[in-house]
Each structure stands twice: as structure tokens, then as C-alpha cells.
Amino acid sequence: MAEAFNSVELPQDKAARYAALAEEIAAVLEGEPDLTARMAVVAGMLAQSFPHFFWTGFYRVDPSRPGELVLGPYQGTLGCLRIPFGKGVCGAAAGRRETVVVEDVHAFPGHIACDSRSASEIVCPVFGAAGELIAVLDVDSEIPAAFDGTDAEGLNRILSRVFAA
Ligand code: SME
């Protein structure tokens, strides 16, 4: 019995779940302009929708410290507070302004190990309405190779709808 609670599996219907989630998030955020609230809702609803995600959240571009990301709204265990552009997976995604999918975090040069359970991750850049980089979304899983193009597409669709519209 205990095993059933501890084991998490990859969902087979990821694309459908992302599509449904995009609608739910848009409905919840209708009329809410506050960026922190918007990030908090995305992090929270992602965590609830996919049990194999153990860390979901944002690192924001910090205007007061150029070239640095600072921890934003998230769900999960303690994340490191600041990440320089170019460092780790988050820093790579911010520096390249591209989605980075990592099947095995231990094989990624410079990966920042905030939690030893992290086995794989995806980090997507988050752009505002003017196309400016405002943050990255970091999603970690304890399952190796948990992320693929379906996650990249599903997450980026949600992000552009919530932050660039
Ligand atoms: N995995 C990230 C660090 C942040 S935590 O995982 C929350 C990275 O290497 O960029």
C-alpha cells in the first residue's frame, strides 16, 4: 500500500492534460494583472496536475542585478535563491532564451543540485508582451527522462498565453 503512494508514473495523456490545464489557468487568471499571482497560479496548478513533477516554479529576471535570476513563486522543496545567467539549466535557458530539456541532470555540466531527488528537468524561458525575458519556468521530476517535446509545447503554450498576451 505504502508503495502505491510513493510511486509516481509518467502520464500517458500529457498533451490532453496540458490543453485542459491551459484552459483552467486562463479561466482562473481572467482579469488578474498581478505578475506574482499569475506565476503562483501557474506553479501551483502545474504541481497539482502532474504528480511526477516535484518542483515547479519560476526564477525571475532581477532588474536590480543584471545577469541574475532570483527565486520566484514555486511549489516544492527549498530552491536555491539566485542563479547567474549561463549557470545550471535555468541559467542556460535564460542565457540562450530557449527551452532546455535535460534527460539526466547528473550529466548536465554545471547543473545546480537543489534536491538530490531531481533526475530530469525542463526549463522554459518566459517572455512578456514586448518579447522581453521576464523569467524562466523550471519543472523537475524524480523520474529520469520525464520531459520531451510534448512538455515543451504544452508548457510554452501556457506561458505565452499567461505572460505574453
Ligand atoms: N535545477 C536548476 C536549479 C534550480 S532547482 O532545481 C529548483 C538548475 O540547474 O538550473
Image: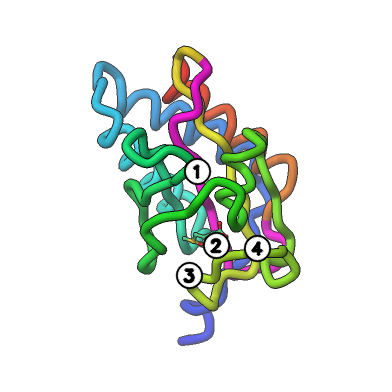
Q: How are the colours assigned in the image? A: rainbow
In the structure shown, which secondary structural element does the residue marked by tag 4 occupy? Answer: strand
In the structure shown, which secondary structural element does the residue marked by tag 1 occupy? Answer: strand
Q: Nearer the viewer, residue 119 or 62?
A: 62
Three-letter amino acid code of the residue under disc 4: Ser
Relative placement, left or right, of 83 versus 78 is right
Mark in front: 2 vs 1: 1
Q: Is mark 4 within 8 Å of ligand 1?
A: no
The label on residue 52 is 2
Q: Which of disc 4 and disc 2 is earlier in sequence?
A: 2
122 up-or-down from 22: above or below: below
Between the C-alphas of marks 2 and 4, the distance is 11 Å
Q: Name the residue under label 4.
A: 120
Which segment did they paint magenta? 131-146
Relative placement, left or right, of 140 versus 47 is right
Q: Which of disc 1 and disc 4 is earlier in sequence?
A: 4
Between the C-alphas of marks 4 and 1, the distance is 14 Å
Relative placement, left or right, of 86 versus 149 is left
Relative placement, left or right, of 41 versus 96 is left
Q: Is mark 3 within 8 Å of ligand 1?
A: yes
138 up-or-down from 164: above or below: below
Between the C-alphas of marks 2 and 3, the distance is 17 Å
Q: Mark 3 points at which residue?
A: 114
Q: Mark 1 points at which residue?
A: 137
Q: Position of residue 47 (x, y in %)?
A: 43, 53
Mark in front: 4 vs 3: 3
- Within 10 Å of disc 1 (Cα), the crowding (few <14, some 14-19, many 20+) is many
Q: Which of disc 1 and disc 2 is earlier in sequence?
A: 2
Three-letter amino acid code of the residue under disc 1: Leu
Res. 41 image quadrant? top left
Say whether marks 2 and 4 touch (CB < 8 Å): no
Mark in front: 1 vs 3: 3
